[in-house]
Amino acid sequence: MMTRKDYVETARILAYVSDKTHPAVFSKMVVDFAEMFAKDNPRFDANRFYSASNYKIPSFRN
């Protein structure tokens, strides 16, 4: 089981690469990590992780 420290460090690394990675690749990495962490810990807060990772959830408008 991963700990909060692991989640925080992963988010820190992702935030660092957020502007150095293609947006589609970055999005896939962040979402995949969030899904993995949520499976590991039902109390994992994906929205908090997204914010800490500097990930902006895309909004699709017509």
Image: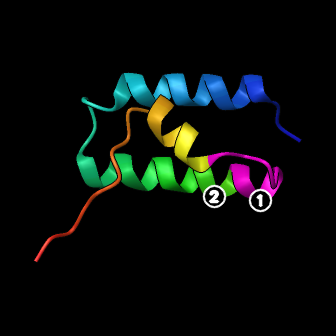
Which residue appears at 68% of the width and 55% of the height?
Answer: 36
Q: Residue beneath label 2, please?
A: 35
The C terminus: image quadrant: bottom left
Furthest-front residue in view?
Answer: 62
Hey, what amino acid is under mark 2?
Answer: Glu
Q: In this view, does 39 lie above or below 15?
A: below
Q: Name the foreground residue: 40 vs 25.
A: 40
Which residue appears at 71% of the width and 49% of the height?
Answer: 37
Q: Residue beneath label 1, please?
A: 39
Furthest-bottom residue in view?
Answer: 62
Please check the rendered image and state whether residue 40 is part of the magenta-colored stretch, yes or no.
Answer: yes
Tell me whether the residue at label 1 lies in contact with that at label 2, contact meaning CB atoms closer than 8 angstroms.
yes
Hey, what amino acid is under mark 1?
Answer: Lys
Left or right: 1 as drawn, with respect to 13: right
Left or right: 5 as drawn, with respect to 21: right
Mark number displayed over residue 22? none
Q: How far apart are the alpha carbons under marks 1 and 2?
A: 6 Å
Q: Name the foreground residue: 5 vs 44.
A: 44
Residue 56 lies in quadrant: top left
Q: Mark 1 falls on what kind of element?
A: helix
Crowd tier of the residue under label 2, counting other residues whose Cα lies within 10 Å: few below 14, some 14–19, many 20 or above: some
The N terminus: image quadrant: top right
- Magenta part of the protein: which range? 37-45
Please check the rendered image and state whether residue 33 is part of the magenta-colored stretch, yes or no.
Answer: no
